[in-house]
Image: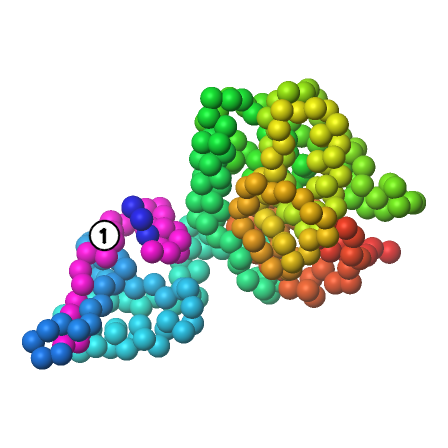
Amino acid sequence: MAFAHPSELEFTRFLDHYRIRWIYEPTAFPIGWEGDRVSEMFTPDFYLPEHDLYVELTTMKQSLVTPKNRKLRLLKELYPDVKVKLMYRKDYEQLLAQAGYANLEVQNIRKQDVQEILISPVELETRVRALGRKISRDFRGQSIVLVGVLKGITFFLADLARQVTVPMAIDYLSVDRYARGGEHSRVRIVRDLDYPIQGRHVILVEDVVNTGVTLDFILHSLELRDPGSISVCTLLDRPSRRLADVPIRYIGFQIPNDFVVGYGLDFRELYRNLPFICVLKPTVYAPVAVVPDAQPEPITP
């Protein structure tokens, strides 16, 4: 079923979790007329037949709250026997927490440390599925090698691989992105590939592309091994920070210049297991040291 917003799909999963039957947008109620002609309708998002209750979600923009409140008021005045509930963002997130979404406390993160949830579990699932389909179409009839750059890529690579339908191998490499005594040692491969890639179609899978400096180094290193082709797939992209001109064929989400964690991304090895991607407040990770193509790294004594 095609939903108007990912939050609606999340809500259906909550309802399914508790085996609550639901119907999506079953009824459009006339609430405004110009003469004999209906000029305005109100269609609640869900109807729960076992509770005889309509539910309307208001989670996208605060600017939508006022017009929805007006429509809800008209609906109750015109149809006093109809039970309808307008669910605000706070109510919605509390419900999702009961089904395992946005439950920050059980994920070893304090709610007051989170500035916002940037990408929800459903948005991640939907986008990864789309990327897998596109890769499968682009390489139909061929085999590929997915190369993951450790270790923030772990969850993304696993989910992406399950969506790819062409024959493939999976390998990993790891780089050291921090200065170790000289300009030429700022980026180096510390765990190399086990699988030979000569003549193979390689898709380099990254978690975040920032400046592109590290990615440019990796691409140059892999091109020396004479692959059939190299494409880049990144879960997150920050084009505003780009320094090196690197080609990115597959992009999950473009994000602002914030410190994000979850879905494999960490802060001091914490928060990788969060099922969503959220923005940490600067007070959590400050003070920081800025390094090329990496999220801010905390300065430790």
Q: Which image quadrant is residue 46 in?
A: bottom left
Residue 29 magenta-highlighted: yes
Question: Which type of secondary structure does the marked residue at label 1 adopt?
Answer: strand
Q: Which residues are magenta?
A: 4-33
| Residue marked by disc 1 | 23
- Relative image position of residue 45 (x, y in whole percent): 28, 60
At 10% from the left and 73% from the top, the residue drawn is: 37
Toward the viewer: 93 or 78?
78
Figure check: 1 above or below 89:
above
Where is residue 14 shown, x and y percent of the image? 36, 51
Name the residue rendered at 45%, 31% in the picture: 137
Residue 50 place in picture, x, y as percent: 20, 54
The answer, for residue 242, to whether it is visible in the render is: yes
The reply, left or right, for residue 192 in relation to residue 25 is right
Q: Quadrant of residue 264?
A: top right
Q: Is residue 154 visible?
A: no
